[in-house]
Amino acid sequence: MKEPFTAINSRFSGLSSKLIITIIGVIMLVEIVIYLPSLASFRTTWLEDRLRVGVVAARVLDAVPDVMALPRELTDRLLLSAGADAIVYRRAGQSQLIEMTEPVTPARAVTADLRQRDLPSQIVGALDTLLAGPGRTLRIVGEGDMDESLLELLMPEDPLRRDMLDYSRSIVLVSLGIAAVTAFALYMVVSNLFIDPILRVTANMLAFRKAPENGTLILNPSSRRDEIGILERELAAMESDLFAMLRQRRHLADLGLAVAKINHDLRNMLTAAQLLSDQVATLDDPKVQSLAPRLVMTLDKAIGFAQSVLDYGRETVVPPSFTLVPLRALVDDAGFEARLTNNPHIVFANEVPEDFQIEADAGQISRLLVNLLKNAREALDNSAGEGRENRVSVQAEMREKDAIISVIDNGPGLPIRARENLFVAFEGSARAGGTGLGLAIAREIAEAHGGSLALAETMQGTRFDITLPLAAR
């Protein structure tokens, strides 16, 4: 069989690798969010630098009455310093133009208006420049240094795009470095606080699962007061309880095996004694005749006790086989088996409606009913002669999604000791010499059907309510 969770032996696998990838991914997303405004700012600064050179050229144009009189060498130098092919200066409704000796006719032109200072427009322009192909002409529009003056520069966009690509590469390298260093630092911190304790707890769970009887594998919890500390302490407590439970069950299993062997031999001896008592009861001696019934009754009780213990020890867990069962007929059969039908001292009333049906395992529910009805009969037998009509009845009704089956007797009720240990094997018996196995088995059957068995509060007698879901499967 494939070993589970083998990946925990590697630090950089499983949860650790997911953590590292997540940290790096988050940092890169943050870097992208920072990168876009940074790229837009770089482009705006680059354009403003070119515009400032254009402003110097505009001052020259203002100082010269006739632009045409400027030496061509001077105008070319001004354009080269700005990196522009042409500069247009507008003020007071007049325009002045200087351009290279050999003007270039732009094939594709795009406008960069520096008067738009909002961040979204700058980011859109930066991405447009970065993703555009080569060969475009850039038209830079901005305000001059004079009132109501406007300056335009025509220049190739390729130098700006190259500088932005270089800047982007630098940002990517710096971002990767920051992401790597930050991810490593965060990983070491998170690993020390969370990953290592979780790996320790997981490894302990796997080791303890293989050998729960080994007390040295019980987790030694740390002194942390956070959720992981609580997890470690609770796991250690659970492992300690499981270790003690398994040891106790092993002892009980060994003891049960020994008791079963002793009980089997004891039952054989009691059976032989019962045969001898039957022969003794045929003697004519008056003393023997007076003592024989008590002897027979005592042996019957001892044999019944031994047989019930053997039956409980041989009990196997079989899941219920659900079928549609007519409850009234089932109660009639259970009453007959419990020796309530035609009982001369007890009135047995089957008050279940004729058409009442439940979805259950007929054999297991019959056994449940027999156990409860036997307990009712024995309670009434022990209280005979109290001046009332002894009565046992079974009722049934539908409540929402459940069927409620009630077994009721008008006996003396359960003593306090029996109520305190109700449904506990060998302790929940209401009569001397009883084992209490009947109620324990009855509750197991009810719970196996997805229902419950409970003692109801009554003014007189005893009432047990069996709750079974109508849709059992």
Image (spheres, helix red, strand yellow):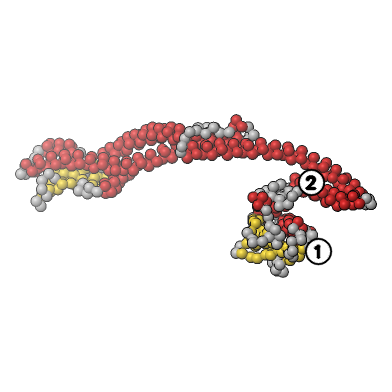
Which quadrant of the figure contains the N terminus?
Answer: top right
Q: Which mark is residue 397?
A: none
Residue 176 visible in this rendered orientation of the protein? no
Between residue 10 and residue 447, name the one nearer to us. Answer: 447
Between residue 313 and residue 280, name the one nearer to us. Answer: 280
Residue 155 visible in this rendered orientation of the protein? yes
In terms of image quadrants, where is residue 217? top right
The image shows residue 471, relative to residue 243, as above or below, that is: below
Residue 353: percent from left, percent from top = 70, 68
10 to the left or right of 302: left
Type of amino acid under label 1: Pro
Distance from label 1 to label 2 (Cα)?
28 Å
95 to the left or right of 312: left
Between residue 162 and residue 10, name the one nearer to us. Answer: 10
Type of amino acid under label 2: Ala
241 to the left or right of 58: right
The image shows residue 184, relative to residue 135, as above or below, that is: above
Callout 1 touching callout 2 (CB < 8 Å): no
Q: Which circle, 1 or 2, is nearer the viewer? A: 1
Which residue of the protein is positioned furthest toward the front in this rendering?
Answer: 286
Residue visible at 73% across and 57% down? 379
Q: Earlier in the sequence, mark 1 or mark 2?
A: 2
Residue 401: percent from left, percent from top = 61, 62
In terms of image quadrants, where is residue 207? top right
* Residue of label 2: 306
Which residue of the protein is positioned furthest toward the top in this rendering?
Answer: 216
* Residue of label 1: 344
Residue visible at 40% across and 32% down? 185
Q: Around disc 2, counting alpha carbons within 10 Å, would you say few (fewer than 14), some (14 to 19), or many (20 or more)?
A: many
Residue visible at 18% across and 37% down? 80
